[in-house]
Image: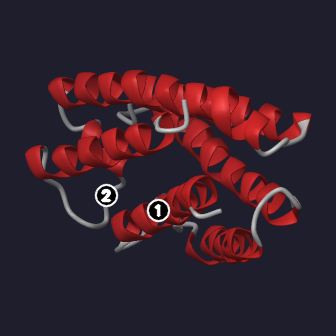
Amino acid sequence: MKNLGIISIAVIWAGLIFLIRKWKGNVSMTFSQHAAQYRSSQIYYFILFLIGVPLSTLFMYGWFIPNFHLPFLFGLVVAVCMFSMMVAATVAETKGRKVKVHRFAAFLMATCFVPLLILIALSTHFSIAVRVLAGLSAAYQVVGIVLFIPVKGYHPKVLPLQASYIAVFHITILAATYLR
């Protein structure tokens, strides 16, 4: 179960890199906007998360949460995060109501990362180094949410910002898992 974390992260990142190379856009487009361009890219994106989310969920509930004795609240936030991730992957950001549903689900998923990182930072079951990393990652994400929320859905460099936002979460989870 422990290695499902790194496997799920590797699958998601390899899949996202393939997505933005195969269905080209620009750095002002999110991963989801790259995926929404064509029916084939929408299907690919859904399948990517249909694989990645269950692997992540199994890792979190099967190893991470019990191994580090994390509270019920952590598991609840993970559930909200995974559910909203699947909604965002299922509802393509194309037009009309789908844009609102997708963006709400994506924003909910992204904001779930912050309390998860804060709970890791506050838990005595992690090393000091991991707790500091989690705190710094949460601070980075809060700054990202406050300062870089795009105006009217646009930011000229949203893709690298989104990628770094996700990466600091994944790096913290991997550090917690492998750097005791």
- Residue drawn at the location 40% of the way across and 62% of the way down: 163
Q: Whole-percent x and y of residue 129?
A: 69, 76
Q: Whole-percent x and y of residue 165?
A: 52, 64
User: Is residue 84 found left or right of 96 in the rendered image?
Assistant: right
Q: Secondary structure at mark 2?
A: loop
Please give the residue where the numbered disc 1 appears in the rendered image: 167
Toward the viewer: 58 or 28?
58
Quadrant (top left, top right, bottom left, bottom right) of the N terminus: top right
Mark in front: 1 vs 2: 1
Circle 2: residue type: Met
Please indicate, yes or no, whether residue 152 appears anywhere in the rendered image. Answer: no
Toward the viewer: 133 or 22?
133
Q: Find residue 80 and name its label.
A: none
Label 2: how many residues lie within 10 Å, few (<14), some (14-19) or many (20+)?
A: many
Label 1: how many residues lie within 10 Å, few (<14), some (14-19) or many (20+)?
A: some
Please give the residue where the numbered disc 2 appears in the rendered image: 29
Mark-to-mark CA distance, 1 and 2: 17 Å
Toward the viewer: 97 or 102?
102
